[in-house]
Image (cartoon, rainbow, N blue to C red):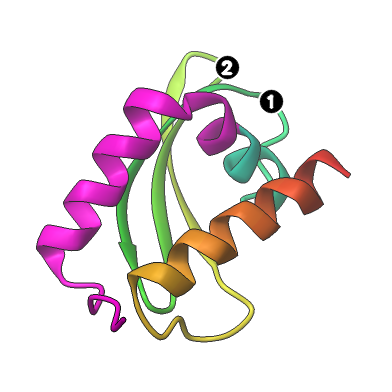
Amino acid sequence: MTSEAITPAISDRICKHMNDDHADAVLLYAKAFGNQTEATAAELLAIDPLGMDISARVNGDVVSVRVAFDRPLKDAEDAHHTLIDMLKQARG
């Protein structure tokens, strides 16, 4: 089975899923990997092979956060596994 490249359409699909079903994880990414420890809410805006763009609410302001991955992602399946691993690390 081959996985899909991370195109803008795939990015949109991943973002919608994460924001709708895993908003707590997106907030943890902003806090743990985006150095926004005061964030109270976050929304995943885009994901690409090198990282993800998050909009975080910090002390009443909306802050843009870029979280870089530790290596370039190969495809959508790699993104899925990487996001799970990052979540485990953030909760660690």
Task: Examine the rendering and report whether any part of residue 57 can be seen.
Answer: no
State the residue position of label 2: 59
State the residue position of label 1: 38
Q: Are marks 2 and 1 in contact (CB under 8 Å)?
A: yes
Taking the spot 48% from the left edge, 30% from the top edge, the residue there is 22
Taking the spot 81% from the left edge, 39% from the top edge, the residue there is 91
Corner quadrant of residue 30:
top right
Taking the spot 69% from the left edge, 25% from the top edge, the residue there is 38
Task: Examine the rendering and report whether any part of residue 33 can be seen.
Answer: yes
Magenta span contains residue 25: yes
Residue type, numbered disc 2: Asn
Asked if residue 81 lies left or right of residue 51, the reply is right
Give the Cα separation between the discs numbered 2 and 1.
7 Å
SS at mark 1 in the image: loop
* Residue 31, percent from left and from top: 67, 38
* Residue 60, percent from left and from top: 48, 13
Asked if residue 1 lies left or right of residue 29, the reply is left
* Residue 62, percent from left and from top: 40, 28
Region in magenta: 1-27
Corner quadrant of residue 81:
bottom right
SS at mark 2 in the image: loop
